[in-house]
Image: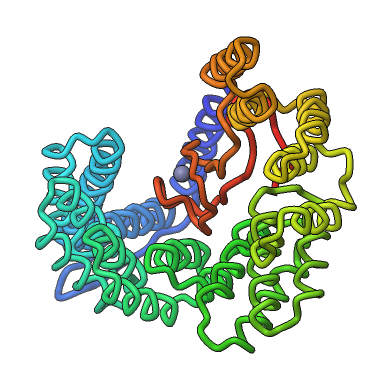
C-alpha cells in the first residue's frame, strides 16, 4: 500500500515537473553543423533531461554487456563450489555409514569439483582406507603431510596405519613428527601412550598418562623393568609413595629394598600395604625368606598387625597354622574368615585340608572332606586381577590388560558378589 502511494506520488511529481517545464516562457535556438533548431525553453529542457536519461541507460546496458563473461564465470564457480560442498557432505555421510563405494565416489567428486584441499584429500584417503586400499590412502596422507595446512592430518593417518600393521618403530617416528607439527595435541598424547603400552615402554607411558590410576601402574612397571638397582629403588619408592596401598607398587618397592639389604624396611612397607589392602602376594613376599613353620606364623602376625580382623588375615593365619599342625587355631581362623564374608573356592579347599588333617581317614572325616570339596566346586571363584575395561581375570598383575590392551588398569577382587580390599 505504501509502495502504491509512493509510486502515485512520484508519478504526480514527474507529470507536474514535465508540465511546469513545458509551460516555461521563452525560446531556445540551437545552431549546430548548419542545422538550426528553434523551440520553447521548457521543451528544450525536457528534451535535455530525456537525452541524459537515454545516455545513462545506454551506458548501463553497455557495462552490463562487458561484465557478462565475468558474471558467467562467477556463477559457474559458485555452482561448482555448491556441488563440491554437497559431495563433501555426501562423502562424510557415506563414511559414517561405512558405505564404501558411495564414500569413494563422493570423495573423488569432491576432489574434482573443489580441487585438492586438506578436506577433500582427507575424505579420499579415509574412503580408500575403509576400502582396504592402504597404499592409495598412504599416498594421499603423504600428499597431505607435504602441505602446511594438512601436515598433522597426514601424519595422523600414517600413524594410524603404522599402528594397525604393528610397525612400532615407524609409529614412534611418526608420533614424534606429528608432535613437532602440533605440540601437545590431546589425541596424539593418548595415541603415544597406547603405543608405549604396546611396546612396554612404561616410563614413557607413565609420562603420558593423564589420570592417576594408569600412571601409578606404569610407574610401578617402569620400576620393575629398570636394571640399575639404585634407579629401580628410587622409581619404586616414588610409585609406592603415590599410593601405599597399591599392592604392585608395595611389592616392587619391598622387593628392591630386600635386594638392597634393607629387610626391616621391606617388611614395614608390606605391613603398611596389608593394613590398607590385604593381598596374598604381600604375604608371599614377606614370608619368602622364612622356612620355619612357627616362625612363618610369627612373621604373618607381624605383617597383619594393621588388619587383624580382616578375613584375608584370618585366611592367611588359617593356612599357616594348619601347615604347622595347629588345627584348632586353623579352624578358628577359617571360621572367622567365613564369618567375615569369604566363601570362595580357596576357603573350602582349606576346610577340606583341615578335615583331612584333623580327622584323617575316619568316616566322619571323609564325609566332612566330601562336603567341603562339594562346597568348593560350587563356591565363588577365587579373587583375581580383573580388567576394568573387558572384564578378563588375570592371576598376576599387569600394568595394562594383556587381553584388550586397555590401560584403564586391573583391579584386585572377587569375581562375583564379594569384593575384597581393592588394590
Ligand atoms: Zn581388558
Side of 403 relative to 245 (left or right) = left
Residue 290, percent from left and from top: 69, 64
What residue sits 22% from the left and 49% below the top? 84
- Where is residue 32, by image quadrant? bottom left
- Where is residue 283, by image quadrant? bottom right
Q: Is residue 344 above or below residue 136?
A: above
Residue 401, percent from left and from top: 47, 50
Residue 19, percent from left and from top: 47, 40
Residue 140, percent from left and from top: 17, 65
Total number of numbered discs in the rendering: 0
Side of 12 relative to 243 (left or right) = left
Q: Is residue 369 above or below residue 112?
A: above
Closest to the observer, 14 or 204: 204
Closest to the observer, 144 or 7: 144
What residue sits 56% from the left and 28% below the top? 381
- Where is residue 339, by image quadrant? top right
Residue 275 appears anywhere in the view = no
Side of 86 relative to 237 (left or right) = left
Closest to the observer, 407 or 347: 347
Q: Is residue 101 above or below residue 236?
A: above
Side of 379 relative to 234 (left or right) = left
Amino acid at each position: 500500500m505504501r509502495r502504491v502511494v509512493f509510486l502515485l506520488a512520484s508519478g504526480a511529481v514527474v507529470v507536474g515537473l514535465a508540465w511546469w517545464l513545458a509551460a516555461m516562457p521563452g525560446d531556445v535556438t540551437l545552431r549546430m553543423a548548419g542545422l538550426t533548431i528553434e523551440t520553447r525553453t521548457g521543451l528544450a529542457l525536457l528534451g535535455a533531461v530525456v537525452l541524459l536519461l537515454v545516455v545513462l541507460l545506454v551506458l548501463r546496458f553497455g557495462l552490463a554487456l562487458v561484465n557478462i563473461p565475468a558474471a558467467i564465470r562467477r556463477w559457474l564457480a559458485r555452482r561448482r563450489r555448491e556441488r563440491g560442498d554437497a559431495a563433501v557432505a555426501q562423502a562424510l555421510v557415506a563414511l559414517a555409514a561405512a558405505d564404501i563405494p558411495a564414500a569413494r565416489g563422493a570423495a573423488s567428486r569432491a576432489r574434482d569439483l573443489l580441487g585438492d584441499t586438506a578436506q577433500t584429500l582427507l575424505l579420499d584417503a579415509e574412503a580408500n582406507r575403509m576400502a582396504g586400499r592402504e597404499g592409495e590412502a598412504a599416498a594421499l596422507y603423504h600428499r597431505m603431510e607435504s602441505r602446511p595446512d594438512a601436515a598433522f592430518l597426514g601424519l595422523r593417518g600414517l600413524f594410524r596405519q603404522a599402528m594397525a600393521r604393528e610397525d612400532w618403530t615407524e609409529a614412534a617416528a611418526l608420533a614424534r613428527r606429528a608432535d613437532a607439527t602440533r605440540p601437545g595435541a590431546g589425541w596424539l598424547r593418548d595415541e603415544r601412550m597406547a603405543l608405549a603400552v604396546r611396546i612396554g615402554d612404561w616410563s614413557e607411558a607413565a609420562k603420558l598418562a593423564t589420570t592417576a590410576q594408569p600412571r601409578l601402574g606404569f610407574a610401578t612397571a617402569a620400576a620393575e623393568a629398570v636394571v640399575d638397582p639404585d634407579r629401580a629403588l628410587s622409581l619404586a619408592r616414588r610409585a609406592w609413595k603415590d599410593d601405599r596401598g597399591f599392592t604392585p607398587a608395595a611389592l616392587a618397592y619391598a622387593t628392591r629394598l630386600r635386594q638392597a639389604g634393607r629387610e626391616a624396611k621391606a617388611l614395614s612397607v608390606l605391613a603398611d600395604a596389608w593394613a590398607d589392602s590385604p593381598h596374598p602376594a604381600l604375604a608371599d613376599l614377606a614370608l619368602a625368606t622364612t622356612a620355619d613353620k612357627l616362625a612363618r606364623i610369627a612373621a604373618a602376625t607381624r605383617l597383619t598387625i594393621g588388619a587383624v580382623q580382616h578375613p584375608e588375615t584370618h585366611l592367611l593365619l588359617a593356612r599357616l597354622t594348619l601347615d604347622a599342625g595347629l588345627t584348632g587355631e586353623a579352624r578358628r581362623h577359617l571360621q572367622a574368615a567365613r564369618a567375615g564374608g569369604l566363601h570362595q573356592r580357596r576357603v573350602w579347599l582349606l576346610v577340606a585340608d583341615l578335615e583331612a588333617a584333623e580327622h584323617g581317614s575316619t568316616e566322619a572325616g571323609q564325609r566332612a572332606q566330601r562336603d567341603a570339596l562339594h562346597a568348593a566346586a560350587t563356591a565363588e571363584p577365587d579373587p583375581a586381577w580383573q580388567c576394568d575395561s573387558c572384564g578378563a581375570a588375570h592371576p598376576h598383575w599387569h600394568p595394562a590388560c594383556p587381553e584388550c590392551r586397555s590401560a584403564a588398569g586391573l583391579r584386585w577382587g572377587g569375581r562375583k558378589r564379594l569384593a575384597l580390599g581393592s588394590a
